[in-house]
Image (tube, rainbow, N blue to C red):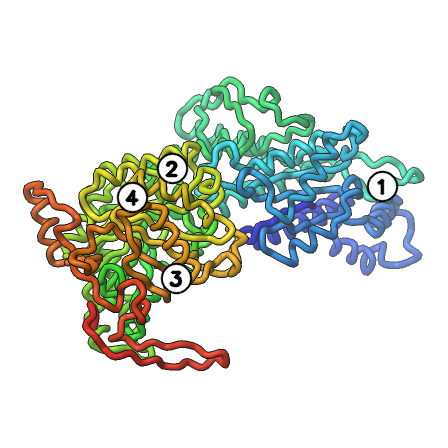
Amino acid sequence: MLVFKPATVAVAVAVVSASIAYVLWKQRQQEQGTSPKQSARKESSGCCGKDSATTTGCCQSSTNDDNVEAEEHAEPVAVRILYGTHTGTAKGTALSHVVDDNLEHEHVLISILSTWTGGVPPESALVFCNWLQDMAQDFRVSKTWLKHVHVGVYGLGNSEYDEHYGKASKALSKHLSSLGASRLCPRGVGDDNQDQAAQFDSWSDHLIAALCEQYGALRSPAASSSSSPSVKPKQQPAGWKSQNEFRRQKRKEKAAANGEDTEEAMWTAEDQMNEIVLELDQGDDSDDEDNRPKKQDSGVVDVEDIGVVMKESEAAALSREMVTPLQRKALTKEGYKIIGTHSAVKLCRWTKHQLRGRGGCYKHTFYGITSYQCMETTPSLACANKCVFCWRHHKNPVGREWRWKTDDAKELVEGAISRHQTMIKEVKGLPGLIQSRWEEAFTVRHCALSLVGEPIMYPHINEFCRELHAREISSFLVTNAQFPEKIAALEPITQLYVSVDAATKDSLKAIDRPLFKDFWERFLSCLTQLKAKGQRTVYRMTLVKEHNMKELDNYVELIHLGEPDLIEIKAVTYCGKSDASDLTMQNVPYHQEVRDFCELLCAKLGGGYELATEHAHSNCVLVAKTKFKIDGHWHTWIDYDKFHTLIQAYYKDGTPFTTMDYIAPTPAWAVYNAPEAGFDPIETRFRRTKEGKVVEIEYTATDSGCG
């Protein structure tokens, strides 16, 4: 059995393998007309219990003896399991040791193949898939090479990627069929946006049923021996029905109970799905569109594979929840507190740092927020990108439009605050916790809408921000620059970020891996929309060595396009090995490299922007328009009380306001090139030595925005 198995379905595949083994064993017992217990009873009791038994009664025929002998010599059907994951070393090693040339000697091949960027197989399965493609396209290889092999193919992917959805498994299925392999059941595709485990369970059930039907054609060595008489397929017990017949009978019974015409009963989407899954098309060796199975009479169902139907039927559910059970489990395990059906909140590590007096985040240095009173949340876990440096490791949903159940904005804000406060309670036992700060932390003053996903996708994002502002909570919203119409419709907030992860179309595609085909046009349109915003706008640039640090001239063009007030430039954060990317610590720039990049960028901009502040701990530098430098002093901080006064006036009568109406002076310790390098002197800094000891570093306390 050939299985390219992602980690998410490891347990499911093991269960299926065990089920298949049991089914084959059970079927062989039934073919021999006996069971192990019955055989034992024959040997120990009754007329067959003695060696000198007569040839009358139950031992009169030699057929039973022949069956027992055949059973003793029967061999199980070989099951080949190949592991081809993106990060599993052992599984990748198992795949690399496969002897491809012996594929024709397998009996059953079951392939579970995930999809990587561009619709290609995962790296560990790429060699095998390319080899199989070469075999299928080689005119010297017989088209009946795999005629004795029965195959089942299941793909894993995300339906938002359109033509790339399950593309790798489709190609594999096509190549196997073109070499003569017989399909046990139609190809299945699991959608990451749906309940993938349930989809896989459904497909595997039909696979096992197909094995039961097909196994009668696979004979044991004793049965296939030329010296033995031919064995006819075993007659099914009276009343036995195939899966197709049983399903049709149940549908007719249901229609009859409801007083409907049993012959003309309307088919549901589930009926159509079952029909496709259970029809064993052994003779169809092509994946061409003209050869796809069609359902007659009840409306044409032109199906490429069951995954397409699955996508369409699930999309019809108007109240479907965004987060699938698998995604909910994965996110919860990582510390996310799920709110409703599509939102989450999580306690930031900088919140815990500042609660202990060990320093705040870069927003504290750049804009004067109080980190221990900041809540990190999102009203939309779904995103339109799958960035290679995403620190969430792609455990969240993806999508290009909102098509899920929508929760109320007020309930989401209340739920986020409640769960955030619960997490604050849980950290009371932290060593070095400052009691006064812990008590103040229950009052949320700032909200970073940057946890995960794309917050601006939420249909009621304006109402969500209004709920925050009504509680005097500032709003820092981050968008991935794929929804220009949402940016245009966004009401004033404290600060609007746009992620600028690359400066060219090709590099943006490679880094962000967007779902939209017109991602570059959308990206440019989003940047253009920033000019119309009267409040603070920010470009958020993440530097990845060997990916996007050599495009300075292109970055200059993008900055002139959107003219942001501020530009945050930071080094990528390495979050450990991920299935989502091949980034390592070698891709993380040093802080000095970030500084050098920023200095070159300002020089190429030719004025209008200067280096304002830095936070060395975060490998981050803030470039600001020179309008924030008043009388030689930077004013990148925010007067939050003034902002809340201005925003309430805007809500009341539409009174406009601008960025410069709520600025505040930046303290000396936060300014670029200051000896503190952005670390608030009122805090206590700790550094770990080479020996692993934590050493305290003292600064002379000065005025700051915290404590």
Query: Amino acid type of disc 2?
Result: Arg
Mark 1 vs mark 2, foreground winner is 2
Q: Quadrant of the C terminus?
A: bottom left
* Residue at left offset 71%, top offset 51%: 96
The answer to which image quadrant residue 677 occupies is bottom left
Would residue 50 be found to the left or right of residue 132 on screen?
Answer: right
Front in this rendered view, residue 316 or 68: 316
Residue at left offset 35%, top offset 40%: 558
The three-letter code of the residue at mark 3 reads Asn
Work out how far the residue at label 1 is from the one at label 2, CA to CA, in angstroms: 57 Å
Q: Which label's residue is closer to the chain start, 4 or 1? A: 1
Residue 285, image x and y in percent?
68, 27
Label annotation for residue 223: 1
Please tell me which of labels 4 and 2 falls first in the chain.
Answer: 2
Q: CA distance from mark 4 to mark 2?
A: 12 Å
Q: Which residue is mark 4?
A: 456
Which label sits in the foreground, 2 or 3? 3
Mark carried by residue 400: 2
Residue 71 seen in the figure: yes
Q: Which residue is under mark 3?
A: 619
From the viewer's perspective, tell me whether residue 667 is left or right of residue 675: left
**Sequence-first tag of 2 and 3:** 2
**Residue 43 in the image, given as x and y percentages of width and height:** 83, 57
CA gap between label 4 and label 3 equals 27 Å
Nearer-N-terminus badge (4/3): 4
Gap in angstroms between the C-alphas marked 1 and 3:
72 Å
Q: Please state which of residues 145 and 356 is positioned toward the viewer in this rendering.
A: 356
Labels 1 & 2 near each other (Cβ < 8 A): no
Q: Nearer the viewer, mark 4 or mark 3?
A: 3
